[in-house]
Amino acid sequence: MPNQTAKITVLPGDYIGPEIMNAGLAVLKAVSEGTFDYQIDEQPFGGAGIDQTGDPLPQRTLASAKASDAVLLAAIGGPKWDNAPKRPEKGLLQIRQELNLFANIRPTAISRAMQKYSPIKQLAPVDFVIVRELTSGIYFGRPREIDAHHAIDTMRYTTNEIRRVAQVAFEMAEKRHHHVTLVDKANVLATSNLWRKVVAEVAADYPTVAYDTSYVDATAMKIISAPEQFDVILTENMFGDILSDESAEITGSLGTIPSMSRGTSGPALYEPIHGSAPDIAGKGIANPLSMINSVAMMLRHSFNRPDLADIIAGSVDAVIETGSVTPDLGGQATTDQVTAAIINHIHERR
Ligand code: ATP
Ligand code: MG
């Protein structure tokens, strides 16, 4: 998006949400100075949306998101709205639907600086992403029934639903290490056989990307035993749900991991994978790295600025290396101290 002001809708949300959003925006400002032109439209969402308008996804918030080039979200929800007539999380489902965000992308990266936090001992750096289909499969399939003696869930996929998310995965691989692994259970499931057929067709359109397949049970083991072998893991909704939580665990830290949700066109949404952490809100100790890494992911994928994303990533690693980290990583630094240290590194690198 050269020579054009990038429009970013900012949704700080609830509890630690605004604290880490401030950190993310401060880093965005520092890295962008003089080279990336953007404007921010901050809107209420989640619990904050309910408090201000009665609705977790207020009309004006949705309008702003739809008119944006990217949406940055911190975290929503928490005990304050436990008994609210509408749940904050409802807003998330709605905005995903409205923006047609059918692909959820979660990176698992264990850089040298992060290795000491990982519960697995890795010699090679780990750097893969899971591209998870987000709006179909067994979580949405009908019929869904339960009575005293039986219950039914339905896993259902169409070729279109598979093709569009497969294309996201292959495009991602072209920007990364040129390798897609389709994860399924094709020895048992009919849906998995349809995935194999459609994804093989899509793979033929991306000749520079190596393509292979792996059963989900074997993949669950390999994520622990040999995670360095993966680049892009493509999978359906439920398998992706489970494997992405497993993958988060091997980094040793919820507080550092960003995510992206996107459709075929229109704005993508970037957010930390963790919740609003009500237990530590207001204490100034929330780990801002998940939000800062979300900003980097946005610059890389929505604004084609891998140079700026790399400056952020390098600065984050450098600060982790110094041990200036928040209590969730065993340190004593505050949110603001970590953020300030990262901004110092950014200034040195630019
Ligand atoms: P969700 O809201 O997604 O259902 P949850 O409520 O179970 O998740 P989180 O809000 O993600 O959980 O928090 C889980 C634990 O991790 C809490 O103890 C929280 O304080 C901690 N945590 C989450 N994010 C961070 C962060 N950025 N920095 C420090 N600690 C965090
Ligand atoms: Mg929560």
Image (cartoon, helix red, strand yellow):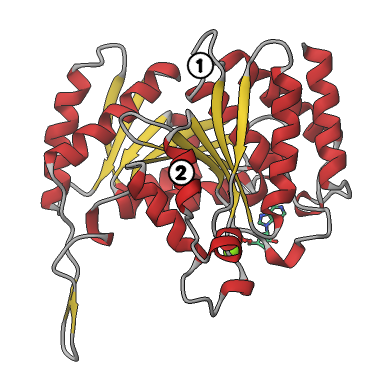
x then y, percent, for residue 279: 73, 67
One can see residue 280 in this view: yes
Residue to which mark 2 is pinned: 223
Residue 292, above or below 156: above
Residue 156, above or below 103: below
**Disc sitting over residue 304 in the figure:** 1
Q: Which residue does the image show at 86% across and 48% down from the upper left?
A: 334
| The residue positioned farthest toward the top in the image shown | 3
Residue 274, above or below 47: above
Secondary structure beneath dot 2 equals: helix
In the rendered view, does 306 fall on the left or right side of 339? left
Q: Hey, which quadrant is residue 310 in on the image?
A: top right
x then y, percent, for residue 146: 20, 81
One can see residue 106 in this view: no
CA gap between label 2 and label 1 equals 29 Å
Q: Amino acid at mark 2?
A: Ile
